[in-house]
Image (cartoon, rainbow, N blue to C red):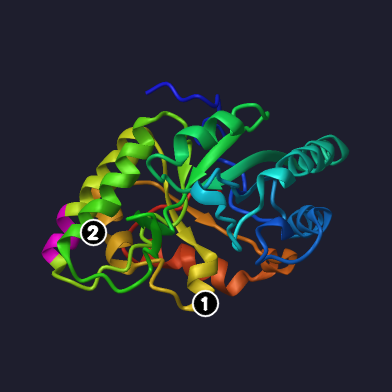
Amino acid sequence: MKRYFDFDINDYKDKKCNFHSHTVRCQHAVGEEREYVEEAIKEGFEVIGFSDHSPYLFKNGYVSRIRMTMSQLEDYVKTIEALKKEYRDDITIFLALEMEYFPGIFEPTIEEIRQYPMDYLLLAQHFFYENESFHGTRFGWADEAHLKTYVELLMTALDTGYFNMVGHPDIVNYTGDDALYTKYMKQLADRLKQERIPIEINVNGFREGYNYPDKKFVKLGVENGNDFIVGVDAHNPNEYHDLDSYKGCIKMAEDFGGKVFWK
């Protein structure tokens, strides 16, 4: 499928990369953008992408407390574009956004986003949007319907052609039948493989002991022949130095016989 943003993560497969990093604008990260760049350089990263939580044109004037506002977007773009130029001899920097797919909200929002020179979009479905309210995908969902909906949301989002990669695709905290988990999540793994998008093993989730990265999905991906990438998901510049968690993510894939690239 031809994507809207002309970016292919596979062009950087032989480099040490992180395409998942935030800024203070998301309201739950700390540190200056320059600090993220400099700490990444110290740790030997050759490529990084800033993919802060995207603003949305929510209905009824709703303002999120976990993402930037639309009024901050221009400054975000200018700041990252300036850092690209300043550090071009030391590291490759990309400008991106991390976005959920909320039907009915995504469409007008992406029209605004398209006005800016994004290099790529990172799909990461933290929430279901049901009856005009948000419910975290990390809640314990035991019913088949929510697992099916989660996978369908990601599939539909990828169908739009706007997304170049997927962050923590195993974030959905399904606590029901293992056979159903395998049935639906294999569909997702198949689609990622088809799109040549690696499965992200998320350092932030590993460090914090979240339900992701999920060993079940990593094992499924290895058996399915998917590639893997480590996503730092940095909310603090010092997280570029959390080598224990970084190496733990690599080991999770390698323990099942998987291969991690971009490291």
Q: Residue furthest top?
A: 2
User: Residue 170, percent across and down?
Assistant: 36, 60
195 lies above or below 257? above
Outermost residue, bottom direction?
A: 209
- Nearer to me, 227 or 76: 76
| Amino acid beneath label 1 | Glu
Relative to the observer, which residue lies in front, 230 or 208? 208
Q: Residue 142, position in %: x, y?
A: 20, 71
Q: Count neighbours of disc 1 (C-alpha within 10 A) and say few if under 14, some if 14 to 19, many if 20 or more.
A: few
Q: Quadrant of residue 252?
A: bottom left
Mark 1–mark 2 CB contact (< 8 Å): no
Left or right: residue 156 compared with residue 28: left
Is any part of residue 34 visible from this angle? yes
Would you place residue 45 above or below residue 256 in this image? above
Identity of the residue drawn at 73% across and 68% down: 238
Q: Amino acid at mark 2?
A: Leu
Q: Residues within 10 Å of mark 2 (few under 14, many from 20)?
A: many
Residue 244 located left or right of residue 116: left
Find residue 34 and report its horizontal and vertical position in percent. Answer: 83, 53
Closer to us: 68 or 184: 68
> x, y percentage for residue 43?
73, 60
Label located before the other in sequence (1 or 2): 2
Give residue 115's mark. Answer: none
Q: Nearer the viewer, residue 51 or 105?
A: 105
| Residue at the disc numbered 1 | 208
Secondary structure at numbered mark 2: helix
Q: Quadrant of the N terminus?
A: top left
The magenta-colored residue range is 179-183
Query: Toward which corner of the image does residue 161 lie, by quadrant?
Result: top left
Residue on which the image places disc 2:
147
Q: Residue furthest front?
A: 60
Residue for point 52% across, 47% down: 58
